[in-house]
Image (cartoon, coloured by chain):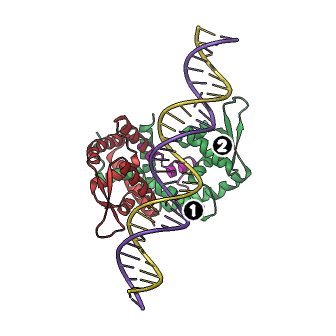
Chain colours: A red, B green, C yellow, D purple
DNA sequence: GGCATATAGTTGTTTATGCAACTACGAATT
DNA sequence: AATTCGTAGTTGCATAAACAACTATATGCC
């Protein structure tokens, strides 16, 4: 019976996720400072495409925890910036497969380095054991709320 | 030197805060199901006003980790829904003090119950010690990135 | 084959965010 | 008192999110 675990002042910041917001903002700032002109949301899509190119939009929805309209528009914007291309699947004409442009490939190394740097800034003074614990809790929370 | 703490697959979800996103989405759903027609962002402002009415917009910025334009617009929308009122300060004519309407006061009990219920759903199977640990890590991350 | 149903993706609408530029007022300095 | 600087709040613009409604294609069943 996990009641009263959250004192009033803490409940709000847990729900709103101020820590992850702060990390995201810092990463965005680090991108900007390095002259990289993409949003973290766009980066999060590229991140999954770097792992595996040619995914469908639906697969990107699942990977990034977004709904279909969100991915449609993120891919729209990535296409405008010439970072990805929609290629219709030959097997199933409903499906778009998303491929990276050369330009997007060159972004990978730089942005991943910035992401790691940002996380290191964020996790200064936190032990590896603590990080593992926190990840475990967050994972459990996510699973508890997954439909 | 906390390098390599994040294996590739985990980095993304830490940055994007999928757990807190899930909590927020669930809370929003629970509001809707209870016939309460406010967004969680609006609720987060009300939350601080319930603790202390008559705060300035700047104070709400600090409390909710938002910038001034965001609060301006949230207060706009809350005013439209007749949940708050802007009252110009008599001491300093630059300042708006934000007060709750009767309607907003009646929302407090219901929504706080729903927020607690949502957190209990989220934290099922997580021990109090784990929660404390996770909170500590998230707090440290937030502090590390605070200017 | 033809119809019902499911899946992939798009579009419209409302709300929210971040940043830059702006107005209005107050405080400090000279 | 006038100038300068800082603070409170607003507005414009671009991007993104959630939800509902929509189109197009595929699949399964009769």
Disc assigned to residue B30: 1
Disc 1 and disc 2 on one polypeptide chain: yes
- Coordinates of residue A65 in the picture (x, y in percent): 41, 58
Q: Residue B48: tell me if it is visible.
A: no
Give the side of residue B108 with respect to residue B125, left or right.
right
Q: Residue at x 34, y 68 (%)?
A: A93
Location of residue A39 by image quarter: top left
* Alpha carbon separation for disc pair 1 and 2: 25 Å
Return the chain for callout 1: B
Work out whether residue A87 or residue B126 is closer to the camera in this orientation and state it.
A87
Residue designated by label 2: B52
Q: Residue B93: tell me if it is visible.
A: yes
Q: Which residues are magenta?
A: A2-23
Precedes in sequence: disc 1 or disc 2: 1
**Dot 1: what SS?**
helix
Work out whether residue A58 or residue B103 is closer to the camera in this orientation and state it.
A58
Give the side of residue A137 with respect to residue D9, left or right.
left
Q: Residue at x 65, y 39 (%)?
A: B55
- Coordinates of residue A14 in the picture (x, y in percent): 50, 50
The image shows residue A58, relative to residue A115, as above or below, that is: below
């Amino acid at each position: 019976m996990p009641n009263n675990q959250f004192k009033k002042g803490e409940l709000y910041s847990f729900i709103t996720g101020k820590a992850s917001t702060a990390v995201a903002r810092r990463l965005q700032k680090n991108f900007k400072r390095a002259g990289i002109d993409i949003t973290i949301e766009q980066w999060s899509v590229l991140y999954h495409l770097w792992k595996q190119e040619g995914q469908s939009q639906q697969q990107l929805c699942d990977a990034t925890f977004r709904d279909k309209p969100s991915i449609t528009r993120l891919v729209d914007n990535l296409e405008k910036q010439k970072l990805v291309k929609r290629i219709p699947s030959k097997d199933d004409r409903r499906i778009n497969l998303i491929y990276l442009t050369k330009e997007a490939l060159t972004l990978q190394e730089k942005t991943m380095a910035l992401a790691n740097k940002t996380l290191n800034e964020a996790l200064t003074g936190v032990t590896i054991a603590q990080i593992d614990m926190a990840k475990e809790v967050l994972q459990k929370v996510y699973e508890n709320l997954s439909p």
